[in-house]
Each structure stands twice: as C-alpha cells, then as structure tokens.
Amino acid sequence: MATAEAMGRVVAEDIVAPGDLPFFPRSTMDGYAVRAEDTYGASEGLPAYLRVVGEVRMGSPADIVVGPGEAVLIHTGGMLPGNADAVVMVENTREVDSSTIEVVRPAARGENVLQVGEEVRKGDLLLPAGSIVRAQEIGGLLSQGITEITVLQRVKVGLISTGDELVPPEEVPQPGQVRNTNAYTLAALAFKAGAIPLRLGIMRDDREALVQAARDGLRQADIVVISAGSSASARDMTADVIRSLGEPGVLVHGVALRPGKPTILGVVNGKPIFGLPGNPSSAMVTFELFVTPCIYRLSGCRQPLRRFVKARLTRNIASAAGREDYVPVKLHEQDGEMLAEPVFGKSNLLSNMMRADGMAQVPLDRNGLAEGESALVIPF
C-alpha cells in the first residue's frame, strides 16, 4: 500500500534502506562553509578574517570550491562545497564588508555538518517486520523514496450485542428499553487498536438466534465479541453458546476484576471469542484488558507499551483484596503535581466514563487506596 496512507498499519516484511541518507554532506546550520583549519585560534579579541567567495543556493549542487582563507555562505540543509569540512554558525561571525567576515569562534572539523550516510546507511534496517507504522516512520520511509510498503491485513472484530431491551441508537427507546451503545464504543476501541470493527447487530435473548449470530461472526471475523449475557443470570446464555460452537470453547468464566467480573474468555476452532459484560464501563475496561492485546497479537505485532500516569488521589478508593479494581478518575495539575479525583458511580453509568480522563488501578493485593496516596492511572 502507499506509504503515505500506512499510518497504524503493521509492516509485513523487513524494510531496509536503499541508499545512504544524506547522500551528500549537508549543513545543519545557517552560516559559512569553511576549512576548519582556517578558524583555529579565532576569538573575539583576535578573529580570523575570511573572504566570502560565493553562496550555496538551496536545492542546487555546490559548484564552488573553498580555498585557503575563504568562506561560502550556506543555509541549513545546503550541500557542503568542495574542500569545506565545517560550518561556522552565522552567530559566530561578523560582517566586515560585502566580501569579508570575521570568525570569532573556531570550528572543529565536521562541526555543523551531516556527513554522507550519517543518518542512514544503505542496507540499514529501517523497520522490522511486525512494526506499527507511526508518523515518523512515514516521513522516514518517504525520505528514502520508499513510496510503497507491504503491510499485514487488519484483524476483523465481530461485535454482537445481546438483550431484548436494546434498540438502535437512532430509535427513541420505550419504557424498559435502552439504546445499544456498546457496539459503538467497542467498535471505536477496536478501531483504535488497528482492527476493522464489524457491528453484527442486536440479538434477542434467544439461544438459537445467538448461536447462529456467533457462527456467522466466526465466519466473517478473526475475533468475536459478545456484549452482555455473560453473568450468572438465568437468561444469560453466552457461556453455553460458546461451549456449543466448537473446541475448546470456554477457557475462563469470571475474572478477579471490577468492573468486569463475569467476563468470558474462549476459543472456538482457533478463533478467540469473548463474552463481555453489558454494563458500558465494564465492557470498555474488559475490552481494553483482554480483547485489545488479542488484536495486536493477531495483527502480527507487539502491543504498544501501556502508558501510566502517577497521580495523588484526592479521595479514598475502596476495594477488596484478591480483586483488581479500575476506577474512573479526573486528572488535573496543581502546584506541579498531578491529582486524580475518583468519579464514583455504578458500572452501568457511561456518563462516569465520559467525565473521566483515565482509570486508576487498585492492585490485586490491596484493600483500597487512601486519599493522598499515589495511584497508577491509565489515561484514555
């Protein structure tokens, strides 16, 4: 695909440099190209006097040679002229007249010069297979004239929402009904991880209908996520459906986590399948903890390092030992210190997540975190 359009894609094969970069010696400063030896010993009190014999025009080859006691005006990025081996910054010079300058500070050989191949050598590994293309990679590859690269296919994530109470977001819910938001928030998280989200619709609380939807999802997608239907309720049938689809079926049903305790982790005939809670914030947390790493693994790349922020809590956070908790927090800076204000509320309140800037983590072995204590926060 076109390199310029490859942001976030995964490189399928090693990419090596086709040539040296730069392929000609370049100035890294505005100033004068000189022979370094002509500036040795120069100072404010005893400057070196050099004759200006020309200028290197940007975008043009340097067709001039620097002789003893001479200098050539040059600009950042300009090609170093023949015999020159250093650039004196313009700040270290004084103009005497239209053809003479004073140099008040000596330049070392190679100073302010980017040598041939100093940035990249021909044959250097630019990007190993499995790398995620970032903005700097796009620029770096294009600087080498690499306008097309081979990338891996994006992982497809099939999203199934379950529940008789769900209606599409564009409909006005009647009493007892709610809009289906999980399909869209989880689709956004899948897209953020580089996957292609497939919203496969709303399934009513009917076992056969859910079985058929899950089978269709497994045919169309690389990962299937069933939202809601994972708890111990008599009408929650996701675990039973996953078991019926193929081997090995359900691997884990229930995790030591809040929110998200009833999460289901499964594999059906080689494809990952997840049953996530229906509560919006629970679904978001468990998707990020379990589905996102799976997306990166199937994409053929390592998951980017998770970024944590250390912040001091403004209120107590209660928890229970043996369970990892994630609590929405608002972040703000005060007197140079990052503070985290917990946003308390039940896990079915999506508004809590909208007000939050991240999730504070309460470790598995803690009974909670006290006001004033530092917490690790995963920013959104």
Image (spheres, grey):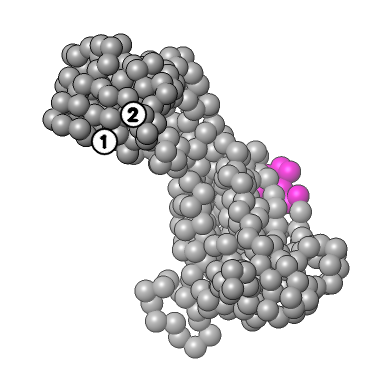
The residue most toward the left is 98
Left or right, 92 with respect to 196, comes to left
The residue most toward the bottom is 175
Q: Which residues are magenta?
A: 244-251
Residue 232 in picture, x, y percent from top left: 75, 70
Residue 76 in picture, x, y percent from top left: 29, 32
* Residue 197 numbered tag: none
Location of residue 322 with respect to 57 vertically, above or below:
below
Q: Circle 2 — which element?
A: loop
**Residue 20 visible in the current orientation:** no
Left or right, 233 with respect to 302, comes to right
The residue depicted at 59 percent of the width and 69 percent of the height is 336
Instruction: State the image quarter where residue 363 is shown.
Output: bottom right
The residue depicted at 46 percent of the width and 14 percent of the height is 123
Q: Which residue is mark 1?
A: 94
* Residue 47 numbered tag: 2
- Callout 2 amino acid: Pro
The residue depicted at 26 percent of the width and 35 percent of the height is 94
Q: Circle 1 — which element?
A: strand
Please name which of the two marks, 1 or 2, marks the residue nearer to the observer.
2
